[in-house]
């Protein structure tokens, strides 16, 4: 039986926006190890569930989906949001 991981996306470090950080993602755990393709050298596997990512508006909706489908799940809590308060003058100390 495949297991899933439920998590909330962290904020993108390269941008100041917080788009899609309120969504919860259901992602399947890899079913088999990746192996190198002999012709191209790219890593891949025959497990297509690895490509599926489902997005939900709330944690409860994501949990309800996993329970309805009979999938064991683990919930990774959202990372704590910390603010680094800094004044412009601190750049010149």
Image (cartoon, rainbow, N blue to C red):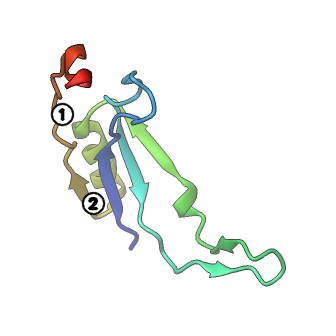
**Circle 1 sits in a helix, a strand or a loop, which is it?**
loop
Callout 1: 10 Å neighbours few (<14), some, many (20+)?
few
Residue at 27%, 60% (x, y): give it: 73
Q: Position of residue 4 (x, y in %)?
A: 35, 60
Q: Which residue is mark 2?
A: 73
Q: Residue at x 42, y 38 (%)?
A: 55
Q: Position of residue 71 (x, y in %)?
A: 33, 62
- Above or below for 53 versus 71: above
> How much space separates mark 2 and mark 1, taking CA atoms?
24 Å
Q: Which mark is residue 81?
A: 1
Residue under the image location 17 percent in, 28 percent down: 84
Q: Position of residue 46 (x, y in %)?
A: 64, 74
Side (left or right) of 47 relative to 93: right
In the rendered image of this protein, does residue 58 appear above or below residue 71? above
Camera-side residue: 17 or 72?
17
Query: Where does the C terminus fall, quadrant-wise?
Result: top left
In this view, the residue in front, 47 or 79, is: 79
Vertically, is 80 above or below 3?
above
Mark closer to the observer (2, 1)? 1
Q: Within 10 angstroms of label 2, few (less than 14), some, or many (20 or more) residues?
A: some
Quarter location, residue 36: bottom right
**6 left or right, relative to 37:** left
Which label number is shown at residue 70?
none
Residue 8 at x, y = what percent?
A: 30, 41
């Amino acid at each position: 039986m495949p297991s899933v991981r439920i998590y909330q996306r962290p904020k993108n470090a390269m941008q100041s926006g917080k788009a899609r950080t309120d969504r919860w993602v259901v992602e399947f755990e890899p079913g088999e190890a990746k192996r190198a393709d002999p012709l191209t050298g790219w890593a891949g596997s025959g497990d297509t569930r690895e490509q599926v990512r489902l997005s939900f508006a709330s944690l409860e909706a994501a949990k309800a989906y996993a329970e309805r489908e009979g999938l064991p799940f683990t919930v990774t809590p959202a990372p704590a949001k910390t603010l680094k308060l800094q004044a412009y003058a601190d750049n010149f100390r």
